[in-house]
Amino acid sequence: MDWSIQDIARIAGTTSRTLRHYDDIGLLKPSRIGHNGYRYYNQAALVQLQRILLLRGLGLGLPVISQVLDDETDAAKALTGHLEWLKQEQHRLARQIASVTQTIEAVKGGGEIMAEDMFNGFDHTQYKDEVEERWGKDAYAKGDSWWRNMSAEEKAAWKQRSQQLGADWIAAATAGIAPDSAEAQTLAKRHVEWLTGIPGTPASDARGKDDAGKRDVKGYVTGLGEMYVADPRFAKNYGGADGAGFVRDALKIYAAENL
């Protein structure tokens, strides 16, 4: 069974012009061309189109998508990775929806907004003992004081930034781009900047210091990358062990070249 280009455009929510462009650049070839010159697509082509649209949804450009499709020819394996990322996004959005719904109900009803409800599921003290053991009590005290002195709006912004960073890492890993690619290294730069914004971390404390301080940051960043892979609690933030491995490799390359 196959479908005409008009059928696929309607079903997929795209346009015939877009599908013809995908054909012209070799991204999505029709399975056959009828005697009338119309393009027709079979099931394999539909699977390919679904992958393309998913990757477009992740913000990737067409040249990168072409490379990803060439590198990962096993459609089932690739779509399994996409599905894992979508589940992560579904979970993140469900929690945000519940949080915002509670806030709206409280505001409309004139009730008191509870920070614990607004930020349900975020416990910044859960790693207290580990932080003190790894980097000392002063490191934890600085970070704890920083968090407690933030307003609700600042906490929400910081949490959103953290979640978005994690989601972007998962998207990049799912897309199959290389750790040394420009996209991955941009993410690594964002990650290091995110770390330097948290008081008490070696990355934050080394800002403005000499080369010795920078070397400490390099060791800290690469060490965190290894921890992301080794500890399932952290790996889950990046879609599992494979995603965490991608983050580790990208951070290691960034640290070697920039820290």
Image (cartoon, helix red, strand yellow):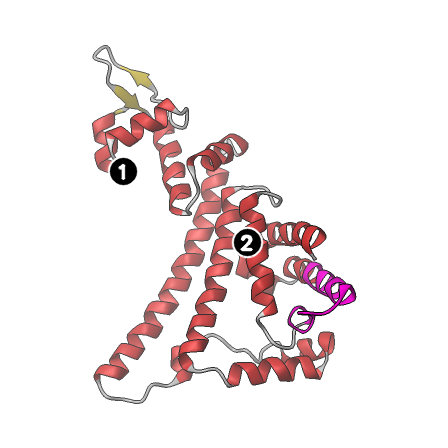
In terms of secondary structure, what is the magenta stretch mainly? Answer: helix
From the top left corner, tell me how far across and down residue 181 is, in percent. 58, 43
Residue on which disc 2 sits: 187
- SS class, disc 2: helix
Quadrant in which the C terminus is drawn: bottom right
Residue type at tag 1: Ala
Q: What is the x, y in percent for residue 65?
A: 45, 36
Estimate the x, y position of residue 112 in percent, counting from the top left.
Answer: 31, 89
Tell me the residue at 38%/78% (across/down): 118
**166 left or right of 93 in image:** right
Q: Judge whether 183 appears above or below 70 on screen.
A: below
* Residue 173 belongs to the span the image colors magenta: no
Residue at 35% x, 24% y is 23
Q: Which residue is drawn at 55% across and 54% down?
A: 187
| Residue carrying label 1 | 12
Q: How far apart are labels 1 and 2 at the CA level?
A: 30 Å
Find residue 136 and name its label: none
Residue 99 is situated, as x and y percent measured from the top left of the image, at 35, 74
Q: Give the range drawn in magenta.
A: 202-222
Viewed as shown, does residue 207 lie left or right of 236? right
